Image: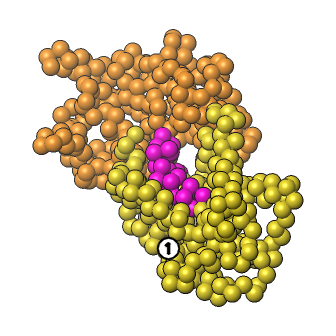
Chain colours: A orange, B yellow
Amino acid sequence: MIKLDNVTKFYKYKNKIHYVLNKVHFEFPTKTNIAILGHNGAGKSTLLRLIGGMESPNSGKIHTVGRISWPVGQTQGIQGSLTARDNIRFVTQIFGKSIEESKQIISFVENFAEIGKHFDMPVKTYSSGMKARINFGLSMAFDFDYYLVDECTSVGDKSFRDKAKAMFDEKRKSSSIIMVSHNMTDLRANCDVALYVNDGKVKLYEDVEEAIKLYQNYKRVG
Amino acid sequence: MNTNHQFKFINSLYLFKNVIWALFIKEIKVRFSNKGYLTYFWILGEPLFQIGFFIILFAYIFARASRFGLPIQLVVLTGIVPFQMFSGLISKSMGAVDANQALLAYKQISIFSTIITRTCVEAFLTVVTFIFIYSLYCSFGLYFPIHNILLFVTSFILLIIFTVGISFMTCVLGFFFPDSKVVIQIIIRFAYFFSGTIFDISILPHEYQKILLYNPVLQAITLIRRSFVQYDLPSYGSVSLSYLFMSSMITLFLGLLVYFTVRDEFIKQARART
């Protein structure tokens, strides 16, 4: 369960205040995959980070029950100077996995991300797509109640996106995916409902198409 | 319900151990794997060069480093290596947040654990360096048997505790006031000359001895040095294990107090920087 209780989040630049969330009161639905849409700078990534515990609201509270993944983007959670293998091993260790389980997880991510021999080279040498795929595969390897995904399924060719979709379908049986993306195809394919973030407010749409139309119309006018 | 609490307690210790171990392995890997042989060489080479330089300096230029005829090689070994642990850990503590920035995305990683890990790494490397140089001496025919191993170990542990206390404070200060990092580095530079690294306190006049004896690092170094000789060394009395003990405990307490007071704000700001 993720609940935002009168949450306000703003950023200050000199004298200007930009409200990302303004007294938002919202509860995320469970066992559904949720898309988060909005124009650039509306606050999608911030919302994800708030849920993931990476940032705190300026006022209000966020109640969470259950296991929530770290916000999976392109670079968070990955140490550049280590190889992908070392990074994954690190994460399995802090989650208390046994050596057997660690080996399984490492080979799972290796097969999923498909980066070849780069797997044993420092992550800082990877392209942004490779980093995103490793990060994404890594979060899928663990059991969470909520998976937070920030624009990293759009990097990757069709076969990767098919794999990601299959993974989402698998996870949907027991967990929820909360996904931020600008790629409408991905959102259509993977999500059941959509959350539209705009002007400090969020609104839930049971129909993803409706939210997408709203987003696209906004782009044309603004 | 009693057993549930016990289970949770032991489970949380187990989780902490996992985090420290994972961070420890990561630190070692980051320090050594990508840089090639130069890193291995320099970890040991740096104290070795300093020691070599001061041995030559004192052997040929100054008359002696200790009033009681302690050999110069012993004096600099027991001075430079422990001090390097002290200054190394303080530097590392100030860099702990930046170095682990990406990993703060995981809830299990706290800044406390990064500092504890860096302490373990520095202590481990110090022991390795000490053993290495000691063996080097032995290979040259210089044998310095330890007469009081309990004193040696206790003093070293207390030095670590003292350093940990200071490093919590410098970590917090360095994060909230980035300019203080430079100031702290400068203070450490000066401390090098006031901690008995390259000379023994016994060569100073009594008035100056009294002042310098307030420095816990100097106390630790002097006690470590004394553990290599017999008991009846005249200045032994004014060098005090109990002073070292108390100052270490108080410093540790203050360091933890500072850290836990600001912890919530600290972790909030640190995570937001990614």
Q: Residues within 10 Å of mark 1 (few under 14, many from 20)?
A: many
Q: Position of residue B21 (x, y in %)?
A: 65, 52
- Residue pointed to by mark 1: B251
Q: Quadrant of residue A89?
A: top right
Residue B129 lies, in percent from the top left, at 71, 54
Q: Secondary structure at mark 1?
A: helix
**What residue is drawn where x is 50% and y is 50%?**
B96
Q: Residue at x 43, y 19 (%)?
A: A154
Choose between B103 and B40: the one closer to the eye.
B40
Is B258 left, or right, of A17 in this rendering? right
The quadrant in which residue A115 appears is top right
B237 lies above or below B23: below
Identify the residue shown where x is 83% and y is 70%.
Answer: B145
What kind of secondary structure does the magenta stretch mostly adopt?
Answer: helix
- In depth, the one of B157 and B266 nearer the eye is B157
Relative to residue B69, is residue A84 drawn left or right? left
What residue span does the magenta drawing correspond to? B84-113
Residue plotted at (70% across, 42% down): B41
> Does residue B62 lie above or below A56 as drawn?
below
Q: Position of residue B212 (x, y in %)?
A: 52, 77
**Which residue is at the front of the view, B254 or B103?**
B254
Relative to B267, does residue A35 appear above or below in the rendering?
above
Q: Quadrant of the C terminus of chain B?
A: top left
Residue type at the position of mark 1: Thr
Whether the magenta-drawn stretch holds residue B100 is answered as yes
